[in-house]
Amino acid sequence: MPPFSGAGVVGPQHRYARADYESSNRARAGPSTISQYVRTLYFDRCLRRTRPPIRYSGRAGSGRHHEPPEATKPRSRRLIVARIERATLADVPDVKRVLSETWTATYGSFLSAEAIQQVTSVWHAPDRLARQAGNPQVFLGVARLDGPSIVGMVTVRHRDTGTVMVDRLYVLPIHQRQGVGDALLRAGLAAFPGSRRARLDVEEQNRIGRTFWQKQGSSEVGRRVERVAGAVLEMVEMEKAPV
């Protein structure tokens, strides 16, 4: 009979007896079994040191499941509440700043810096933006977060009966995928409640912009080629039904 039976250990003499018993068993097992035993202990200790901690969720005894570490969990989209307002003349310099930054981030991969500067200096000239801000047929909206700084803008204008044109919708890269673009678009379309459809143009190489408009329910209705500052661009014409 072994030196002890059961799981209890009552004193030092039992620990010594168990050590002698296990040593005699390993001696009888032979060198190959001893080597395997040592390797098993070694790798088990290594795994304990490198294995990430395991956390469990749920009540004790009710089908608790393994919860992966925070680093392996998928990141969820963080939505923020943006304040959308109609732009005023005082907002024009900040609107131009947002347009300059977003144009570089959006078109810098296929337009030169000189071409972007040439286009923004004309299309986003302060006097042109000021006229749009004061035009009742145009909604020039800006998005703000906690402070006074503008993080995004939209330009929607009345085109004809039942149709509006979304000329611009830009959000600073650091604030994209946070719901700012959605809020800007809703505010722009709400400024023309009688509209049945919205038209817009997006550059074919602007993958982020095309993905955004597709998620908004827009569909492609045509294509055309435009020359912008010496560059040939393929514009994708899209249409969306306002909601």
Image (cartoon, rainbow, N blue to C red):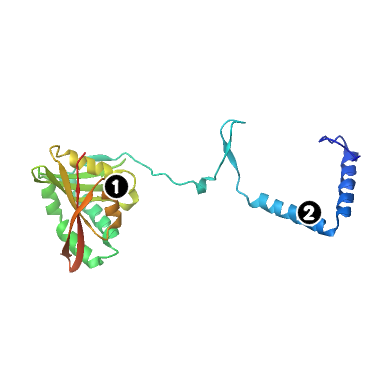
Please tell me which residue lies in front, 101 or 218. Answer: 218
Quarter in which the C terminus is drawn: top left
Which quadrant would residue 116 be assigned to in this image? Answer: bottom left
Q: Residue at x 88, y 54 (%)?
A: 27
The amino acid pointed to by label 2 is: Tyr
Mark 2 and 1 residues: CB-CB less than 8 Å, in contact? no
Asked whether, in this view, residue 236 is left or right of residue 47, the answer is: left
Q: Position of residue 202 (x, y in %)?
A: 22, 55
Q: Position of residue 181 (x, y in %)?
A: 27, 46
Disc 1 target residue? 215
In the rendered structure, which disc, 2 or 1, sits on the residue that comes first in sequence? 2
- Circle 1 crowding by C-alpha within 10 Å: few under 14, some 14–19, many from 20: few
Q: Residue at x 26, y 49 (%)?
A: 213
Q: Position of residue 89 (x, y in %)?
A: 15, 46
Q: Residue at x 51, y 48 (%)?
A: 72
Asked whether, in this view, residue 4 is left or right of residue 138, the answer is: right
Asked whether, in this view, residue 185 is left or right of residue 64, the answer is: left
On screen, residue 226 above or below 60: below
- Circle 2 crowding by C-alpha within 10 Å: few under 14, some 14–19, many from 20: few
Q: Secondary structure at mark 2?
A: helix
Q: Secondary structure at mark 1?
A: helix
Residue lying at the far bottom of the rendered structure: 230
Q: Visible in this render: residue 148?
A: no
Q: Visible in this render: residue 151?
A: yes
Residue lying at the far left of the rendered structure: 161
User: Label for residue 225?
Assistant: none
Disc 2 target residue? 37
Q: Position of residue 198 (x, y in %)?
A: 17, 46
The amino acid pointed to by label 1 is: Lys
Which quadrant would residue 217 be assigned to in this image? Answer: top left
How many discs appear? 2
Q: Residue at x 27, y 58 (%)?
A: 206
